[in-house]
């Protein structure tokens, strides 16, 4: 993972540097001078270019040696492209068709050439714009179940899984971002934090709740030490691209081994934040659109559970909960599956609550709330989100299923906190 | 980790092969022909030699490419010597003076030259012979607390800990032994199993208990996926050598990253098995000696807890439960420490119960019971042990502390099961 010859691409140098790659010329032709190069960025971390010719189009994604959002005062290793590449190939195998196709990977340049998704747009933009996506919940639930199950020792051989844990253990700085920004920074005055000023009283309440901080650290311990499966690691509505009927999951450079419930928990949080932010984005269609978002959450969880149970019964070939102890002895393994799902649910709710906090309190906020310019409108909506987050972390046991979760969201959505 | 030039030592070739090593000649002198070489074995896996001269003595331990207990039908990688070496150096740093000193390590020959402990003998032999060891519980509790705490992200930097998790993830076949023999084989008719014939009815009860098998697999999931700290991995009374007043922990080739409560749970099981086996080994001193074993368990736990709390307050420099969230805000972290200790206790009890099962049902039994030749004497004692094991796995919540654990042991010790 040396990058001695690394040079960051520019729109000017890109064509010259990529025209030698068959993976590129196959799709764009060899007339590099005619290529149109557009730098689009991807938010917080990388260089991203769309390169188009008469013949086709590609995405070129290159890691930068620092956090783009912060600048070169926060260095970040180029090797994250290596982990993104490995994550994408595993996800493609575990849930085919859900991630962009990779055309070329250059470890030295920390560069991935991949499928240009068009006319897909980032799901978060759609949620802010009030657009629906067909079968969104079912897609997400199935994706989370398949990648979780097939990346765990319920399915993989232990030797393969341990080798993969060893490989991803090399990814230190990227998980460190999550460890700090998600689990710890929200609960004290960390240097890079920022929040809507009107939220002060709500934030003080959270930071004075010792049990909440304790549980956030219990979940950090699980996130950092529990290698149950390979997770996407940053699954939110900004990591999903969609048309009205087609969906893909992108940007798994935060991939690591982590608890089975991590991805679906983080994703649920981002749907809940979309839900809570809607009063500032919608008009007369508010109630209908909020209902739709909640239906996505319900559908996501029911599809997750159904798919996980299906895989449990058809692909349980790893060392965990082996048939020799259950089916082969004439004993049902259903309660065992129930137990695994119950643990996933509980972990997911807690990760969900913590994600709802950090997106309003820590460094990287989300557009759902950030695009609400009037802070007197934004703050009360964020406050609902923050208080529900605390409830998810602290009263997990009282929430038995997605129906209870949805009911709770409706309760908080009706509260006037600030 | 290639071993192209590996050749197993013999008592005849040993002197010639080791006389070139300064680490050896420093201690034994250079007159190799006068050295006395005695092969002593170490039970299940390796070649072990005591080499003595007029000037001193050393232990030479060499891995064999198969499981010694089973033969070359069960190959086992030589790289376990590499992990034993790395484990010993970490343990020596985390609890100085508790492990044998290493004089020389040869990765290619899978060979470690180390301190010869004399007149130490294996603790298990002492427990069978009815001998006491001063401060045994305090030593074990402190050792478990220090290695657990200082090997975790409560203390280590995340970068160091992740690098170490990556290193130990290369150890696949050794954890696989534990995964199979400890967590799964006891609960079905695995090929290599053996048990005292009279136990059949008790065993059938265990194997028909779906909840017990489910919990064993939940604990296997934790063992295989939870990298909280570097554990010894095989901490039983056969891995401890002692005089009446001096104690050392040996043989950490099963070291891996695993839950904080694993070592102390396994060790507690081995004290309980020593306790249950005593009626076959003692005469009039039975009650007094059994009381002493129970006092070792109590002392082990109280010393573990005291040391863990001490380290929590003085060495909590890792990313978990940082002072920024607690002490720096004027908030006590005591309930957080209580919570971590409660989780360790609960995990440990369950690991303990499972270890009590596997040592009577799976491949590698222990001498506490195995040396009882009359099976009609042995079986009822093993039955007490097996049934208490199930209670520890299934009724963990009802046992609040070591006092409750000891009371439970006394109850089972009084039961006539077969």
Image: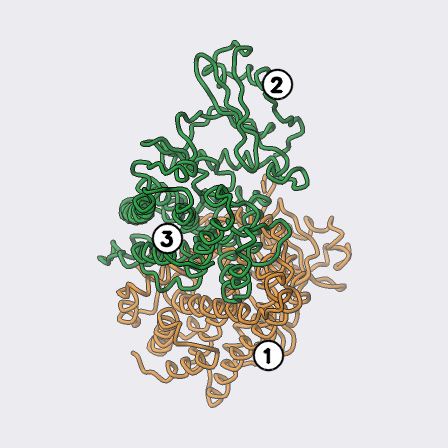
Chain colours: A orange, B green
> Disc 2 vs disc 3: Cβ atoms closer than 8 Å?
no
**Residue depicted at 50% across the width and 51% down the height:** B376
Figure quadrant of residue B246? top left
Q: Position of residue B275 (x, y in %)?
A: 38, 47
**Residue depicted at 49% across the width and 74% down the height:** A271
Q: Quick one: SS at disc 2?
A: helix
- A287 or A143: nearer the eye? A143
Q: Which residue is mark 3?
A: B320
Q: Are marks 3 and 1 on the same chain?
A: no
Image vertical order of residue B148 relative to residue A255, above or below: above
User: Closer to the camera: disc 3 or disc 1?
Assistant: 3
Visible residue check, residue A189: no
Residue A37 horizontal side relative to residue A361, left or right: right
**In the rendered image, which quarter contains the N terminus of chain B?**
top right
**In the rendered structure, which disc, 2 or 3, sits on the residue that comes first in sequence?**
2
Image vertical order of residue A280 relative to residue B381, above or below: below
């Amino acid at each position: 993972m040396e990058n001695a010859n690394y040079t960051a691409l520019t729109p000017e140098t890109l064509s010259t540097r990529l025209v030698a790659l068959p993976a590129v010329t196959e799709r764009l032709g060899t007339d590099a001078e005619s290529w149109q190069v557009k730098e689009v960025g991807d938010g917080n971390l990388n260089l991203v270019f769309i390169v188009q010719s008469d013949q086709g189009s590609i995405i070129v994604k290159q890691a930068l040696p620092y956090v783009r959002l912060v600048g070169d005062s926060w260095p970040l290793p180029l090797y994250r492209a290596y982990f993104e590449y490995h994550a994408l190939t595993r996800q493609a195998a575990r849930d085919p068709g859900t991630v962009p196709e990779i055309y070329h990977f250059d470890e030295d340049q920390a560069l991935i050439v991949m499928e240009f998704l068009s006319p897909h747009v980032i799901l978060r933009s759609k949620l802010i714009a009030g657009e629906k996506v067909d079968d969104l919940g079912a897609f997400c639930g199935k994706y989370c179940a398949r990648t979780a199950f097939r990346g765990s020792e319920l399915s993989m051989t232990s030797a393969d899984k341990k080798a993969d844990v060893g490989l991803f253990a090399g990814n230190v700085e990227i998980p460190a971002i999550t460890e700090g920004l998600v689990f710890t920074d929200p609960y004290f005055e960390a240097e890079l934090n920022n929040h809507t000023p009107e939220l002060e009283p709500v934030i003080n309440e959270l930071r004075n709740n010792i049990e909440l901080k304790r549980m956030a650290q219990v979940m950090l311990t699980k996130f950092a030490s529990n290698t149950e499966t390979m997770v996407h690691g940053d699954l939110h509505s900004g990591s999903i691209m969609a048309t009205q009927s087609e969906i893909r999951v992108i940007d798994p450079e935060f991939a690591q081994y982590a608890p089975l419930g991590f991805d679906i928990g983080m994703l649920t949080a981002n749907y809940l934040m979309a839900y809570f932010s809607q009063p500032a984005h919608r008009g007369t269609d508010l109630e209908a659109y909020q209902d739709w978002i909640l239906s996505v959450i319900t559908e996501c969880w029911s599809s997750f559970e159904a798919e996980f149970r299906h895989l449990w019964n058809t692909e349980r070939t790893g060392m965990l909960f082996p048939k020799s102890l259950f089916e082969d002895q004439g004993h049902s393994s259903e309660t065992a599956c129930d137990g695994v799902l119950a643990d996933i649910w509980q972990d997911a709710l807690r990760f969900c609550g913590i994600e709802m906090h950090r997106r309003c309190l820590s460094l990287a906020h989300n557009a759902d709330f950030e695009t609400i310019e009037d802070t007197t409108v934004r703050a009360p909506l964020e406050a609902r989100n923050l208080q529900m987050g605390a409830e998810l972390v602290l009263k997990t046991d009282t929430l038995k299923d997605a129906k209870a979760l949805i009911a709770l969201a409706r309760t908080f959505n009706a509260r006037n906190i600030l």
